[in-house]
Image (cartoon, helix red, strand yellow):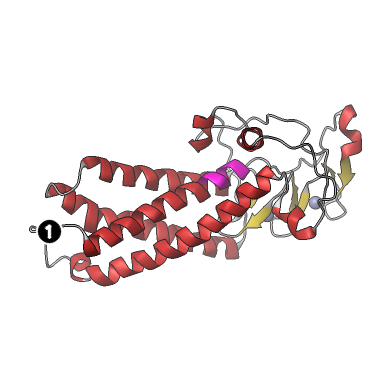
Amino acid sequence: MKLRLHFVVDPMGWFCMSMVLFVWLYNSFLIPKLVLLPHYAEGHIPAAFVVFYYLASLLCVSALFRASTADPGKLAQDPKIPLAERDNWELCNKCNIMRPKRSHHCSRCGHCVRRMDHHCPWINNCVGEDNHWLFLQLCFYTQVLSLYTLVLDFCQYYYFQPLSSVDRADIEVRHELALLRGSCFMGLIMFGGMSSLFYTQVKGILADATTIEKMSHLLEDIGPRRSWQQAMAEVFGTRWKILWFLPFRSRQPLRLNLTSRSHV
Ligand SMILES: [Zn+2]
Ligand SMILES: [Zn+2]
């Protein structure tokens, strides 16, 4: 797999992304230290609970890394336009290059992106044709991780047996209640925000409409109806559903002519 990194120079985006990384670090450190590992050591929970948490955490941060550093579909300065697709290309009046219809010029990144959905400051990158699948994975794994964190916070308060062998002098143990409340607060915000975002993203994919197109009301020409499997396979670049969940792979477009419908 070729891993070409794409970095956007934007201090505002770096700030937003640091906040996301802080939430991930806080919970990925605190929950195993305060809840999972001590209860596993005392035989209250099976090892699978711990492994699943680390796996969800790893997949979540991998999807974040890949979504923020993958090329979203930046247009080349001198693109080779296939003869059959000439009618589907147009000139961008901001960067003065030819681009396929449904591309959009991102003013934050300063270039055009193929089938751009939106610019996301939380990943400090555009969401476009080539990294939309990674953005969906990020929404999905963040929901899984934040929901699991909330369940564990709840169990620690109300359900798990008290621990008999914790170090009471440990700073995290002394401030356990406040730290778990912080975790609950972050979990609720992340789960609520990501669930609604994931729902609107999937709805847009099924309707074959980007966020920018929906906001601009430029959906006059709805294409042929596709099954949800076909719509998702086009975004993820594969019909193999198991691969939809893997962040470390390269994506090959399934349908070449994504440009034949409405445009912004
Ligand atoms: Zn442009
Ligand atoms: Zn952008």
Mark yes or no: residue 128 visible: no
Question: Which of 20 and 46 lies nearest the eye of the viewer?
Answer: 46
Determine the main secondary structure of the stretch shown in magenta. Answer: helix
Question: Which of 10 and 238 lies nearest the eye of the viewer?
Answer: 238
Image quadrant holding the N terminus, namely top right
- Seen in the image, is 51 located left or right of residue 70? left
- Residue 49 lies in magenta, yes or no? no
Image point (84%, 55%), residue name: 94
- Residue range of the region highlighted in magenta in the rendering: 132-137
In the rendered image, the residue lying farthest to the left is 164
Where disc 1 sits, the SS reads loop
Q: Which residue is mark 1?
A: 163
- Seen in the image, is 117 located left or right of residue 63? right
Q: Position of residue 47 (x, y in %)?
A: 22, 41
- Residue 134 lies in magenta, yes or no? yes
Disc 1 within 8 angstroms of ligand 2 (CB) = no
Question: Which of 22 and 101 lies nearest the eye of the viewer?
Answer: 101
Q: Position of residue 202 (x, y in %)?
A: 61, 47
